[in-house]
Image: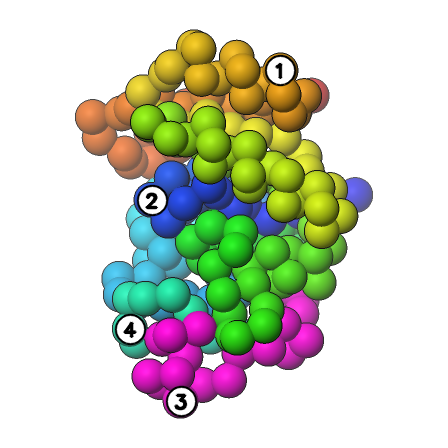
Amino acid sequence: MKNQYFITAIGTDSGKTLISAIFVEAFKADYWKPVQAGFPTDSETISSLINQEYSQVLPEKIILKTPASPHAAAVIDQVVLKVSDFKLPDTSNHLIVEGAGGILVPLNDEETMGDLMKHLNLPVVLVSNLYLGSINHTLLSFEHLKRIGVNIAGIIFNGPPNIASESVIEKITKLRVLLRVKQEEKVDHEVVKKYAAILRNNLL
């Protein structure tokens, strides 16, 4: 049975790419970014963090030149983004899919990243980084995922810990905490391997 997850977050800089690399390493999975806006690409970052002997970084469906919301970057690049045009890449391996921005980031005037999650029909992992206002952002993200009917596999807290924030988020959402990632001075393959081992144990 293949392990497949869609990694999303409460915001743009919450750590989706690092968490995606940890999942790729944990499952020896392939990685796919459906929509990339701007350079350097998240696929390039993933390539530098994982062991590519057993994991492939699969080509993006769409690469947009402008580092902006996909709906805006697509207009600049004269590209049409439609959820129905996306399908999972063909691989026999485990697969980790990374979204762009948060759940309600628009792909066009009607569809959002959340619609893409529902269309691809993978279990969703929500990444939350803790800052003033992140409780609200996390709970709003959780409520929207519930509303659109996706399967939420669990939550990951990324960055400096905040016990008060984490505990209330856990109590209200009742989500399984899959991993806690500390603020690391340097992020490299060794750090990714360390957290991948913890994640594997947590998911057993």
The image shows residue 111, relative to residue 30, as above or below, that is below
Q: Is residue 60 visible?
A: no
The residue that label 2 is drawn on is 13
The amino acid pointed to by label 1 is Lys
The residue that label 1 is drawn on is 171
Helix, strand or loop at label 4? It is loop
The residue that label 4 is drawn on is 66
Q: Residue at x 31, y 20 (%)?
A: 160
The residue that label 3 is drawn on is 78
The amino acid pointed to by label 4 is Thr
Q: Is residue 100 left or right of residue 68?
A: right
Q: Residue at x 46, y 27 (%)?
A: 135
Which circle's residue, 2 or 1, is located before the other in the chain?
Answer: 2
Evaluate if marks 4 and 1 touch, with contact meaning CB atoms under 8 Å apart.
Answer: no
Which circle's residue, 2 or 4, is located before the other in the chain?
Answer: 2
Tell me if mark 2 has few (under 14), some (14-19) or many (20+) residues whose alpha carbon lies within 10 angstroms of its own. Answer: few
Helix, strand or loop at label 3? It is loop
Give residue 16's position: percent from left, percent from top: 43, 43
Which circle's residue, 1 or 3, is located before the other in the chain?
Answer: 3
Residue found farthest to the right:
1
Indicate whether residue 78 is drawn in magenta: yes
Give residue 181's position: percent from left, percent from top: 40, 24
Real-space CA distance between mark 2 and mark 3, rounded to the nearest whole angstrom: 26 Å
Q: Is residue 48 visible?
A: yes
Real-space CA distance between mark 2 and mark 1, rounded to the nearest whole angstrom: 24 Å
| Along the viewing direction, whichever of 92 and 146 lies nearer the viewer | 146
Evaluate if marks 2 and 3 touch, with contact meaning CB atoms under 8 Å apart.
Answer: no
Residue found farthest to the bottom:
78
Looking at the rendering, the stretch of residues picked out in magenta corresponds to 71-91
Q: Residue at x 41, y 45 (%)?
A: 11
